Amino acid sequence: MTYTPPLWPVSVKGVALDTRGRVLLLKNERDEWELPGGRLEIGSADGTVPTDASPEAALEREIQEETGWEVEAGPLIAGGTWIYQPIPGRRVLIVTYGCTVSTPDRPPVISHEHKQLGMFTADEVPDLNMPDGYKQAVAAWCGRADHPATLVDPERI
């Protein structure tokens, strides 16, 4: 018998802040708040769906699709890689990046993928119905002294 190793789904997520320092969160079908992001695209055989070049490129694409915001995926967040079990028996590896929003003057919009969009201060996040791994990533990113998330490169406007 040939051994087949288990495969883990991977989801890339991003902590993105508006100009007031509030984090963008989306409510999913389980009535949980979550960070924007999703899975990497492996592409289609016919080329109609392109392959993501990197986890960062996948995250940038996902956030744009889900919210209309253009972001630059920054560093991995310390403690932002964790295993989540959204339903019994299904585990997902979550990899979280800090993001710099390059379109801060554009209000985010909600896509068909989520029920609600919200903007929350770091102080409001601990009280939300949200997995602890996301809460920890938000706290880590918002607590950075050299936090670049609300800075905008004038050449990108």
Image (spheres, rainbow, N blue to C red):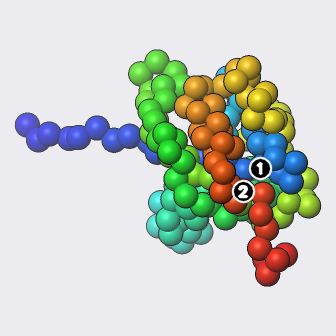
The residue lying at 66 percent from left, 51 percent from top is 145
Amino acid carrying label 2: it is Ala
Whether 102 is drawn above or below 146: the answer is below
Tell me the element at label 1: loop
- Residue 99: x %, y % from top left: 67, 56
- Disc 2 and disc 1 in contact, CB within 8 angstroms: yes
Whether 60 is drawn above or below 2: the answer is below
- Residue 15: x %, y % from top left: 67, 47
| Residue 32 is at least partly visible in this image | no
- Residue 101: x %, y % from top left: 76, 60
> Gap in Å between the C-alphas at discs 2 and 1?
6 Å
The residue lying at 83 percent from left, 64 percent from top is 103
Q: Which quadrant of the figure contains the N terminus?
A: top left
Is 108 placed left or right of 86 in the picture?
Answer: right
The residue lying at 83 percent from left, 51 percent from top is 18
Q: Residue 28: which disc? A: none
| Residue 80 is at least partly visible in this image | yes
Whether 57 is drawn above or below 10: the answer is below
The residue lying at 28 percent from left, 38 percent from top is 6
Between discs 2 and 1, the one toward the N terminus: 1
Tell me the element at label 2: loop
Q: Name the residue under label 1.
A: 17
Residue 132 occupies which quadrant of the picture?
Answer: top right
Residue that protrudes farthest toward the front in the picture: 145
Amino acid carrying label 1: it is Leu
Q: Name the residue under label 2.
A: 149
- Residue 49: x %, y % from top left: 58, 65
Q: Which quadrant of the figure contains the C terminus?
A: bottom right
Q: How many marks?
A: 2
Residue that protrudes farthest toward the left in the picture: 1
Residue 56 occupies which quadrant of the picture?
Answer: bottom right
Query: In front: 87, or 138?
Result: 138
